[in-house]
């Protein structure tokens, strides 16, 4: 389709990105794609932690896997999800759709930029203040540890010292800045769009309409609200284990119950000094100190 628009939204965890995908789902004649690179990193043949894929899914006949490689759909098997397949699928999938929108975690490629789609995509970045992002991320990690019966208290948990598949070496923000720089240097997109999650919450109509206008996405005010139900998930391209987490994990509770971008209460606002969160634990403060320079560099390029 000659007038097809394809966009990848790059983000860190806990930055409203899943709600943003739900919002974009209302664009007519569209296909939403949820974290193919993350699936490859965590569960696929190229995964960092070499768990047994067979333990994640039943034995699936090869002819069925071939069909899912062409049209993975909702709940696809993780064994098809190599980085090379992700690149090929993003480049060739859904030629009949006018709008293809993928959301990905910035750290999921771990610097393997050769697996980015080489052309045809606009790129966007969703920021969030580290002083707000890391406390929320730590709560999510603690929940996952608790669900897996890992004996650790919140006080004992130091998330800046966790392994790379959980906390990337650049603490996500360096990975974001490196990816942004690479996309510009290689002319994959000379003008990536950057927005901030707190700005989106504070003034969703202005930020979302500006985002859509900049990228050529058809905008109406109907994008600002959506149904509380998660039926839309069945239309997304998402792997079976991540689908299960979205439907059942406490970390996605707000996503499942949301009906729009809710404006934060005063207690949830970022602190006046963004480098200092209120009484942060030592690991959170180390993360804020390390990542704030990268966040600031990205924030300076924010969509005006």
Image (tube, rainbow, N blue to C red):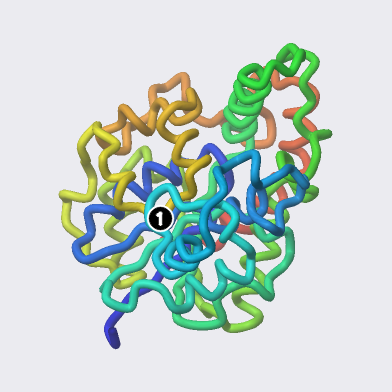
Quadrant in the rendering for residue 30: bottom left
Where residue 198 appears, as percent x and y from the top left, is 45, 40
Quadrant in the rendering for residue 93: bottom left
Instruction: Work out whether 57 lies above or below 148.
Output: below
State the residue at coordinates (47%, 59%): 9
What residue sits right under mark 1 in the picture?
A: 237
State the residue at coordinates (74%, 12%): 153
Pick the quarter of the image with the C terminus.
Answer: bottom left
State the residue at coordinates (61%, 74%): 183
**Residue sitting nearer the eye, 28 or 247:** 247
Where residue 194 appears, as percent x and y from the top left, is 49, 60
State the residue at coordinates (74%, 18%): 150
Where residue 20 appears, as percent x and y from the top left, is 37, 48
Q: Would you say 33 lies left or right of 78 here?
A: left
Residue farthest to the bottom, as pictured: 2
Instruction: Work out whether 287 lies above or below 118.
Output: above
**Residue sitting nearer the eye, 170 or 1:** 1
Pick the quarter of the image with the N terminus.
Answer: bottom left
- Element at label 1: loop
Instruction: Work out whether 163 lies above or below 109.
Output: above
Where residue 182 appears, as percent x and y from the top left, is 67, 73
């Amino acid at each position: 389709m000659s007038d097809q628009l394809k966009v990848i939204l790059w983000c860190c965890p806990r930055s409203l990105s899943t709600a943003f995908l739900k919002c974009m789902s209302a664009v007519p004649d569209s296909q939403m794609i949820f974290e193919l690179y993350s699936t490859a990193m965590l569960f696929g043949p190229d995964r960092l932690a070499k768990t047994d894929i067979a333990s994640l899914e039943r034995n699936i006949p090869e002819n069925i896997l071939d069909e899912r490689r062409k049209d993975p759909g909702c709940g696809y098997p993780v064994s098809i999800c190599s980085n090379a397949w992700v690149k090929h699928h993003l480049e060739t999938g859904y030629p009949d759709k006018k709008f293809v929108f993928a959301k990905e975690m910035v750290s999921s490629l771990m610097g393997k930029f050769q697996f980015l789609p080489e052309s045809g995509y606009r790129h966007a970045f969703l920021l969030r203040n580290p002083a707000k992002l890391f406390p929320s991320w730590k709560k999510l990690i603690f929940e996952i540890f608790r669900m897996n019966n890992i004996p650790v208290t919140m006080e004992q948990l130091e998330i800046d010292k966790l392994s790379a598949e959980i906390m990337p070496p650049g603490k996500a923000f360096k990975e974001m800045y490196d990816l942004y720089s690479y996309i510009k240097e290689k002319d994959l997109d000379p003008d990536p769009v950057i927005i901030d999650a707190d700005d989106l919450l504070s003034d969703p109509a202005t930020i979302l309409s500006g985002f859509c206008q900049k990228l050529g996405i058809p905008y109406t005010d109907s994008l600002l609200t959506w149904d509380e139900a998660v039926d839309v998930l069945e239309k997304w391209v998402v792997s079976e284990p991540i689908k299960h987490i979205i439907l059942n994990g406490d970390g996605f509770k707000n996503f499942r119950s949301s009906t729009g971008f809710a404006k934060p209460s005063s207690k949830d606002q970022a602190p006046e000094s963004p480098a200092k969160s209120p009484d942060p634990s030592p690991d959170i403060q180390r993360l804020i100190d390390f990542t704030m320079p990268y966040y600031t560099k990205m924030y300076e390029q924010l969509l005006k």
